[in-house]
Image: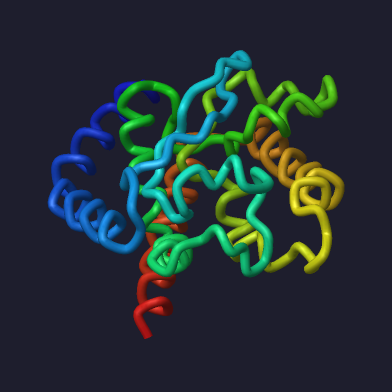
Amino acid sequence: MRRCIDICVAVVVLSLLSPLFALISLVVILDSPGDPFYGGWRVGKEGRRFRMWKFRTMVMNADRLGSAITSRRDPRITRLGGFLRKSKLDELPQFFNLLLGDLTLVGPRPEDPGITNRYTAEQRQIFKVRPGITGPTQLHYTVLEAEAIPEGEDAQQYYITHILDQKLRLDLEYLRKRTFVSDLQVVSQTVLLMAQSLTQTGT
């Protein structure tokens, strides 16, 4: 049932927003030379790796120039990239991952392999389900994480030490209690959050 819903949502969203995808892709290329999409490696259900797609918000080959975690005022972020991140529009290509079955609509946040290889046995229980486009963690940590990382700190190490455990606890707690209704509530809150982000970014 969940997979059928994911496919239907992905087909509808990708069909309706195809003109927006084309427009954003064009503007990304004009703003910064390179591919308009970025596929970062993430770890999903049963520990399987996959590329999670986003609109590119950094310079090309940014992953070779610094940490997997974005720091405050990260120089790799392009001018347009800052807007796309704040408005959450950079996340839209993840609906391709939804269609492919890498992601589900509501679930834990997928992480970089360099971070998941540090998980404890308890934290690795998160791999029993597909990660989600949205979820309680994505909603709770709506403000850019980079703003929480002090300047001068190693961004990835600070994230692992001070933020990651809280996120995983939140996701695991949600999974123990999740229902179809609670998933609908998360989706509704996500739509409202995106609307607010677009409004605030545009002002």
Number of callouts: 0
In the image, is 92 to the left or to the right of 82?
A: left
In the image, is 165 to the left or to the right of 132?
A: right
Q: Residue at x 68, y 68 (%)?
A: 147
Please state which of residues 38 and 122 is positioned toward the viewer in this rendering.
38
Q: Residue at x 21, y 55 (%)?
A: 26
In the image, is 162 to the left or to the right of 72?
A: right
Q: Quadrant of the C terminus?
A: bottom left
Which color scheme is applied? rainbow
Vertical position of residue 162 compared to residue 165: above or below: below
Q: Residue at x 35, y 79 (%)?
A: 202
Q: Quadrant of the N terminus?
A: top left
Please state which of residues 62 and 54 is positioned toward the viewer in this rendering.
62
Vertical position of residue 155 compared to residue 114: above or below: below
Q: Residue at x 60, y 65 (%)?
A: 143
Instruction: Tell me residue 97's x, y (percent).
Output: 38, 30
Vertical position of residue 6 compared to residue 154: above or below: above
Instruction: Tell me residue 192's x, y (percent).
Output: 40, 64
Instruction: Tell me the quarter of the picture where residue 52 sits.
Output: top left
Instruction: Tell me residue 113's x, y (percent).
Output: 66, 27
Instruction: Tell me residue 92's x, y (percent).
Output: 34, 47
In the image, is 40 to the left or to the right of 36?
A: right
